[in-house]
Image (tube, rainbow, N blue to C red):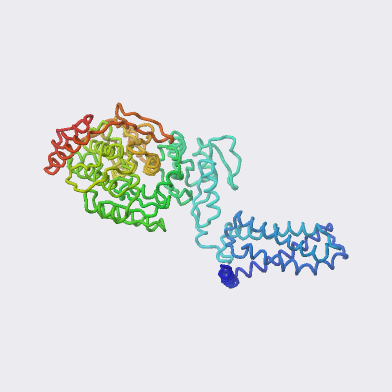
Amino acid sequence: MLATGLQNQKIIFALTIRRPNFWIILVVDIFLLFCAHYFAYVIRFDFQSPTHYAHTFCPFVPLVLALKIPVFYLADLYRGMWRYTSFDDVVHILYASIVSTALIVAVIFFYSRFEGLPRSVFLLDFILTFLFISSFRAGIRLAYQKFGFVHGEHAISQDFKKEKKRIILVGAGDEAEKIIRETEANQSLPYKVVGLLDDDPALVGYKLHGKSVVGLVRDVAVHARRIHAQEILITTAGKDTQQIRRVVKLCQASGLPYKILPGFGELVHGRLSVRNIRDVDYKDLLGRDVVQLEHAQIGAYLTGKCILVTGAGGSIGSELCRQIVRYAPGKLVLLDAGEENLYKAQMELRHEHEGIHAEAVLGKVQDRRLLEYVFASYQPQVVFHAAAYKHVPLVERNPWQAVYNNIFGSQLVMEAAILYGVERFVLVSTDKAVRPANVMGASKRVTELLMQAYCSANWDGTLTKGWNIQIQAPNSHNTRFMGVRFGNVLGSSGSVIPLFKRQIERGGPVTVTHPEVTRYFMSVDEAAQLILQAGSMGEGGEIFILKMGQPIKIAEMARELILLCGKDPDSEIAISYIGLREGEKLYEELITEGEGIVDTGHDKIMVLKSDTRLPGPLLDNQLERLAHLAAHHDSRGVKSVLHEMVPEYKADYSIC
């Protein structure tokens, strides 16, 4: 080991001395160390060094250099990229200065006991050495940042000559500090911060990295014109909903273009950067707080494990994959029936998350033989089942597909989880399963009932015969089943947001089903994070409910989206009411009457302790009937059996 280490050091040394910059830094350091020792004498004797001590200066200069330069080299002071000098580098310089001074003092004490030498000179030498060397390194960084030096030449990069966009920051907090620091450090960025605004009058007049807080947010239009700002950047994402809405309205009134920084919860790796600047989106107006995750608890069941995500190409499935990679799974298996979406998810993981072993499997969850192959080959330990048909009107007119995919497909995945010893199974459900008014919601409620029937506490060792599955099942199992129920996800393929945006781009009208229709909404990243958190809490059979906040009127959402696009909903883009679609209802709910809801240790997650479950024989019989009716595309029959299984389901037999 020692020989290998010495060999590595020789290689590093050989590479280092070949670099021209090494010799430039070394020569400058020798000069600065000489100056530090000289001025230590000058300061010690009030800038008039007595000739009595002049003979001690010259003999000790070679000793000082011979001890300090090797120590500086061993402290890695000649291998850094000094254009990026940081606080850590300054600490290394301080450490090297202390060690080298201590060596010099020890050598002199051993040979001469400081006879005829002023001891204070060495203290002054230490101080000046640290100041001179640190200032030189800091000066290199300053030259690169302020003057655009490139490759050691005093040439201004052509990129830096480009006129930068003058931006004013709304908010003088941590996010603004990071943006100013990055724009100052990276001269290639096309932005120049010219001022800040804040709601706190006490901050007006103060400076942040040399940039002044010029006024209050409410006067953004006045101050932006006064300092000739060309764009407004909102740095207060993730704060109070009303605050974000107020700031956006003020920015709209100013007439200047405006952008926003995403909240930390939206960033998978938690790094905020100028490159994250984007247009204001509707999810910013939701103003939802950053999700506080118990990372150790989540990592305990994900890190190093093989994770299977069904529906991995969908909105929720793909975001689950992005969040799961944060916890270093041993392997990630992506299963989806959509070729394009699966390919996109696979390529994103491959190119943006190096080191993650991700396998893509193209196929349907209804394919029993495929599931047997996937579970036997990859041996997943955790399953997130997000595959489902969710477009309400389409499923309403094709109810047999809900039976095949949402019910029997889920049943097959659950059975495979038991047969192959999966540790945790997390079912992604929906608020439409509560008092369902459509086939999609009813099918998801049946899936929840199936999930509870497969829990170890309710397991009797037999698999249902509803789909002629002939596999020997264990008499008991240890798979923990749980479900997660939440509302609409902004920007998903079934969300109204993409539809509204396309209608606005075409000049309108924006179509809303009913003036009073409301829905619960959350962002896709928040939903995925809370699913992972809920997955760490389940003991078996629970249905976790994500707190969705207040329901939002779709008509108000449409107006705000039109405004965000720079249009007037009263004169430029009309809103048209077209009536409720098949299977839709005015209000969505998260809890069915009679379900026992209990708070969990997490402030955004609740849990249902409902004991509602169908008897095994009855469940078998109803599933067999569903399979028969679906095979004959009998819409009325399918809805009738779903009503038997979910009595609160209000079937619409006019659409058959």
Residue 240 or 215: which is nearer the viewer?
240
Snapshot quadrant of residue 48: bottom right
Instruction: Tell which residue pokes out farthest to the right in this image.
Output: 52
Q: Position of residue 305 (x, y in %)?
A: 38, 51
Q: Is residue 558 visible?
A: no
Q: Is residue 175 above or below residue 85?
A: above
Count the marks.
0
Q: Is residue 227 above or below residue 575?
A: below
Residue 418 or 256: which is nearer the viewer?
418
Image point (66%, 60%), residue name: 136
Q: Position of residue 402 (x, y in %)?
A: 21, 42
Quadrant (top left/top right/bottom left/bottom right) for the C terminus: top left
Q: Is residue 4 left or right of residue 380?
A: right
Q: Is residue 561 left or right of residue 89?
A: left
Image point (50%, 60%), residue name: 159
Residue 79 or 563: which is nearer the viewer?
79
Q: Is residue 380 visible?
A: yes
Instruction: Tell which residue pokes out farthest to the top in this image.
Output: 594
Residue 257 or 544: which is nearer the viewer?
544
Q: Position of residue 217 (x, y in %)?
A: 51, 37
Snapshot quadrant of residue 140: bottom right
Q: Is residue 566 above or below residue 123?
A: above
Quadrant (top left/top right/bottom left/bottom right) for the N terminus: bottom right
Instruction: Tell which residue pokes out farthest to the left in this image.
Output: 632
Q: Position of residue 396 (x, y in %)?
A: 19, 38
Image point (60%, 68%), residue name: 21
